[in-house]
Image (cartoon, grey):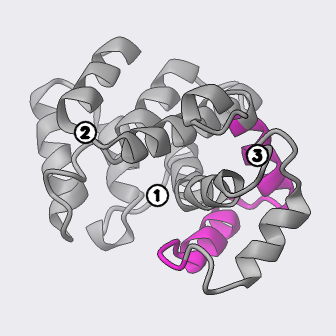
Amino acid sequence: MNYTDALNLMYEYTKSDALRKHMYAVESAMRAYARKYNEEEEKWAIVGILHDFDYEMYPTMPDHPLKGAEILRSKGYTEEIINAILGHASYSGVPRETLMAKVLYACDELCGFISAVAVIRPNKIADLELSSVKKKLKDKAFAKNVNREDIDLGIKELNVPLDEHIKFVIEAMKSNAERLGLKT
């Protein structure tokens, strides 16, 4: 499968513009990390764009992402891609053993949080700083649906410093600001 096939599959199952933008954000981070680690950028982008593709149809645990994994298998996606996607939901019981799976988990909730911070700023993501994200992370009332424990665990599993990871993801998202709806 290639990126275009994955994108078409995402469009087929995901109608929400907000959810699509979230998957674009995660894709942006996955692409940037693939380049950093000299990995296959298209494969990592596919994982980012498909990690929540089944969420609208199967929003309850454990259906998401288990039902999505069944769909991906039927379409010939590799177990490496499927396991990375399954691993982004801890309740799936699939361990995050590959670097790709760890990066997906480390980026998923953080991308959602960074988007929430950026969308309320006058210049959106253009001038978003690490300090603004860290300040909002401490505010439990802000973006309360974002699981901060998942963010912390993802950073721990990826074994990167918090500040470095947040800055890296902000920059990855800035490079795709228009597609994410975060450009002024």
| Residue 36 in the image, given as x and y percentages of width and height | 76, 31
Seen in the image, is 125 located left or right of residue 82? right
Going from N to C along the chain, the mark reached first, 2 or 3, is 2
Which residue lies at the image location 61% right of the left edge and 85% below the top edge? 141
Q: Amino acid at mark 3?
A: Ile
Q: Between residue 8 and residue 127, name the one nearer to us.
A: 127
Mark 2 to mark 3 CA distance (whole Å): 24 Å
Query: Which residue is at the front of the view, 137 or 73?
Result: 137
Q: Amino acid at mark 2?
A: Thr
Could you tell me how far apart the alpha carbons at marks 3 and 1 are, in whole angstroms?
23 Å
Residue 57 is one of the magenta-drawn residues: no
| Precedes in sequence: disc 3 or disc 1 | 1
Q: Is residue 147 left or right of residue 139?
A: left
What x and y, as percent, mark residue 91?
Answer: 31, 73
Above/below status of 169 relative to 87: above
Q: The N terminus is located in which quarter?
A: top left
Find disc 1 in the rendering and name its residue.
96
Residue 2 visible in rendering: no
